[in-house]
Amino acid sequence: MAAQNGKDLLIKVDMTGGGVFETLAGLRATRISFNAESVDVTSLESQGGWRELLAGAGVKSASLSGSGVFRDSTTDARARVIFFDAETPDYQVIIPDFGTVEGAFQITSIDYAGTHNGEATYEISLASAGALTFSAI
């Protein structure tokens, strides 16, 4: 597999609740992280004293984050509504040459910043809020 453009990793939000996805505007950097908690079932009978983990147990989660230039576009407005109304709409994460992750996320933080001689920027963080699906390319 050849190297991929970072700009091709996209975070898209459902704009209407009806499956109309648009890329969050102005993002320059994006990140997705998957986590799975382990459940330790080690006991005195564990072979050789090695730790044992219970397969299929534990909580799975994903987190998204991004940062970029504040554009005050329709997707920026949608993100603000989602945050202040505590909504958990569906998002799509396009991972180049890998696939698409889709499911509900909650915006856990939005930060806005700027300097007098620079552009206004923002950072956004999201946490999974339900089961996610993965569609391979």
Image (cartoon, rainbow, N blue to C red):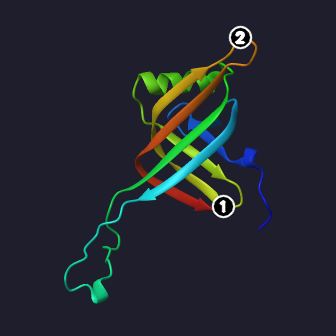
Q: Position of residue 120 (x, y in %)?
A: 68, 19
Q: Residue at x 74, y 44 (%)?
A: 7
Q: Is residue 20 visible?
A: no
**Extreme residue toward the left, this view:** 44
Q: Choose the circle earlier in sequence order: 1 or 2.
A: 1
> Is residue 81 shown left or right of residue 122?
left
Asked which secondary structure carries label 1, the reply is loop
**Extreme residue toward the right, this view:** 2
Q: Amino acid at mark 2?
A: His
**Extreme residue toward the front, this view:** 49
Q: Position of residue 6 (x, y in %)?
A: 73, 48
As measured in the structure, the alpha-carbon distance from the residue carrying label 1 to the one carrying label 2 is 40 Å
Q: Residue at x 45, y 26 (%)?
A: 83
132 vs 118, nearest the viewer: 118
Q: Amino acid at mark 1?
A: Phe
Asked which secondary structure carries label 2, the reply is loop
**Extreme residue toward the top, this view:** 116
78 vs 68, nearest the viewer: 68
The N terminus is located in which quarter?
A: bottom right
- For residue 108, the mark is none
| Residue holding disc 1 | 98
| Residue holding disc 2 | 116
> Is residue 37 shown left or right of residue 126?
left
Q: Quadrant of residue 74?
A: top right
Q: Residue at x 35, y 65 (%)?
A: 38
Q: Position of residue 26 (x, y in %)?
A: 70, 30
Q: Residue at x 63, y 34 (%)?
A: 67
Q: Position of residue 25 (x, y in %)?
A: 67, 30
Mark 2 closeness class: few <14, some 14–19, many ≥20 residues within 10 Å: few
